[in-house]
Image (cartoon, rainbow, N blue to C red):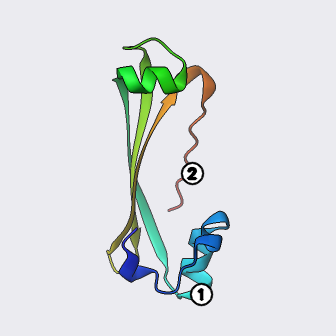
Amino acid sequence: MPLDLVPGLKKSQLYQSVYAYLRDVLGYKISSFHRIIRAVAATEEEAERLEVAAGSPLLELEQVGFLDDGTPFEYSVSRNVGDRSELRDISVV
Protein backbone atom coordinates (compact mmCIF):
# COMPACT_ATOMS: atom_id res chain seq x y z
CA MET A 1 0.00 0.00 0.00
CA PRO A 2 1.57 3.32 -1.02
CA LEU A 3 2.29 5.33 2.13
CA ASP A 4 1.22 8.60 0.51
CA LEU A 5 -2.32 7.17 0.21
CA VAL A 6 -2.62 6.54 3.96
CA PRO A 7 -1.39 9.67 5.77
CA GLY A 8 -1.53 9.32 9.53
CA LEU A 9 -1.89 5.54 9.50
CA LYS A 10 -0.50 4.14 12.73
CA LYS A 11 0.89 0.66 13.29
CA SER A 12 -1.89 -0.07 15.78
CA GLN A 13 -4.48 0.53 13.04
CA LEU A 14 -2.97 -2.29 11.00
CA TYR A 15 -4.43 -4.72 13.53
CA GLN A 16 -7.91 -3.42 12.66
CA SER A 17 -9.55 -3.08 9.25
CA VAL A 18 -7.33 -1.02 6.97
CA TYR A 19 -10.25 -0.91 4.52
CA ALA A 20 -12.43 0.74 7.19
CA TYR A 21 -9.65 3.29 7.80
CA LEU A 22 -9.50 4.07 4.07
CA ARG A 23 -13.27 4.42 3.87
CA ASP A 24 -14.24 6.00 7.20
CA VAL A 25 -11.22 8.16 8.03
CA LEU A 26 -9.77 9.06 4.63
CA GLY A 27 -13.02 9.03 2.64
CA TYR A 28 -11.78 6.70 -0.11
CA LYS A 29 -14.14 4.47 -2.04
CA ILE A 30 -12.82 1.04 -2.94
CA SER A 31 -14.16 0.02 -6.34
CA SER A 32 -12.66 -3.35 -7.21
CA PHE A 33 -10.12 -6.08 -6.61
CA HIS A 34 -8.53 -7.83 -9.55
CA ARG A 35 -7.47 -11.36 -8.68
CA ILE A 36 -5.49 -14.04 -10.44
CA ILE A 37 -5.58 -17.55 -8.98
CA ARG A 38 -3.08 -20.05 -10.31
CA ALA A 39 -1.48 -23.36 -9.40
CA VAL A 40 2.25 -23.18 -8.61
CA ALA A 41 4.89 -25.51 -7.22
CA ALA A 42 6.25 -24.91 -3.71
CA THR A 43 9.83 -23.67 -3.59
CA GLU A 44 12.27 -25.18 -1.07
CA GLU A 45 11.70 -22.28 1.34
CA GLU A 46 7.91 -22.39 0.97
CA ALA A 47 7.91 -26.15 1.44
CA GLU A 48 9.82 -25.80 4.69
CA ARG A 49 7.59 -23.03 6.02
CA LEU A 50 4.35 -24.72 4.94
CA GLU A 51 5.49 -28.22 5.97
CA VAL A 52 4.99 -29.79 2.56
CA ALA A 53 7.37 -31.40 0.08
CA ALA A 54 9.25 -29.15 -2.34
CA GLY A 55 7.36 -29.05 -5.62
CA SER A 56 4.00 -29.68 -3.94
CA PRO A 57 1.09 -27.87 -5.57
CA LEU A 58 0.04 -24.57 -4.02
CA LEU A 59 -2.70 -22.12 -4.92
CA GLU A 60 -1.32 -18.65 -5.52
CA LEU A 61 -3.63 -15.65 -5.14
CA GLU A 62 -2.36 -12.39 -6.64
CA GLN A 63 -4.54 -9.36 -5.95
CA VAL A 64 -4.60 -5.66 -6.82
CA GLY A 65 -7.15 -3.38 -5.14
CA PHE A 66 -8.36 -0.21 -6.87
CA LEU A 67 -10.02 2.96 -5.61
CA ASP A 68 -12.97 4.41 -7.53
CA ASP A 69 -10.67 6.83 -9.39
CA GLY A 70 -8.63 3.90 -10.74
CA THR A 71 -5.71 4.32 -8.31
CA PRO A 72 -4.21 0.98 -7.26
CA PHE A 73 -3.95 1.01 -3.47
CA GLU A 74 -3.04 -2.55 -2.53
CA TYR A 75 -1.01 -5.39 -4.01
CA SER A 76 -0.62 -8.80 -2.44
CA VAL A 77 0.45 -12.32 -3.29
CA SER A 78 -0.28 -15.33 -1.09
CA ARG A 79 0.50 -18.99 -1.59
CA ASN A 80 -1.78 -21.52 0.04
CA VAL A 81 -1.73 -25.28 0.59
CA GLY A 82 -4.86 -26.43 -1.20
CA ASP A 83 -6.15 -28.91 1.36
CA ARG A 84 -5.69 -26.37 4.19
CA SER A 85 -7.26 -23.39 2.47
CA GLU A 86 -10.49 -22.14 1.06
CA LEU A 87 -10.74 -19.23 -1.34
CA ARG A 88 -14.09 -17.45 -1.60
CA ASP A 89 -15.08 -14.77 -4.04
CA ILE A 90 -18.22 -12.65 -4.10
CA SER A 91 -18.91 -10.56 -7.18
CA VAL A 92 -21.32 -7.65 -6.91
CA VAL A 93 -22.55 -6.11 -10.15
Mark 1 touching mark 2, by CB under 8 A? no
Task: Decide: is 56 above or below 2.
Answer: above
Which residue is label 1 attached to? 25
Which x, y percent locates residue 1?
40, 67
- The image quarter containing residue 31 is bottom left
Tell me the residue at 52%/54% (across/down). Answer: 91
Q: In terms of depth relative to the viewer, which is nearer, 11 or 4?
A: 11
Q: Amino acid at mark 1?
A: Val
Which x, y percent locates residue 58?
44, 24
Task: Decide: is 44 above or below 27.
Answer: above
Label 2 element class: loop
Label 1 element class: helix
The reply to whether residue 42 is visible in this rendering is no
**How would you rate the neighbour count of disc 2 (Cα within 10 Å): few for under 14, some for 14-19, many for 20 or more?**
few
Q: Amino acid at mark 2?
A: Ile
Which dot, 1 or 2, sits closer to the camera?
A: 1
Task: Decide: is 79 above or below 42.
Answer: below
Q: Give the spatial CA distance, label 1 vs label 2.
A: 25 Å
Tell me the residue at 32%/75% (across/down). Answer: 71
Q: Mark 2 or mark 1, which is nearer the start of the sequence? A: 1
What numbered label is drawn on residue 41?
none
Residue 86 lies left or right of residue 45; in this view the side is right
Which residue is label 2 attached to? 90
Q: In terms of depth relative to the viewer, which is nearer, 83 or 44?
A: 44
Please identify the residue farthest to the top as the structure is shown.
53
Tell me the residue at 49%/83% (across/down). Answer: 28
Tell me the residue at 46%/80% (across/down). Answer: 6
Task: Decide: is 75 above or below 85.
Answer: below
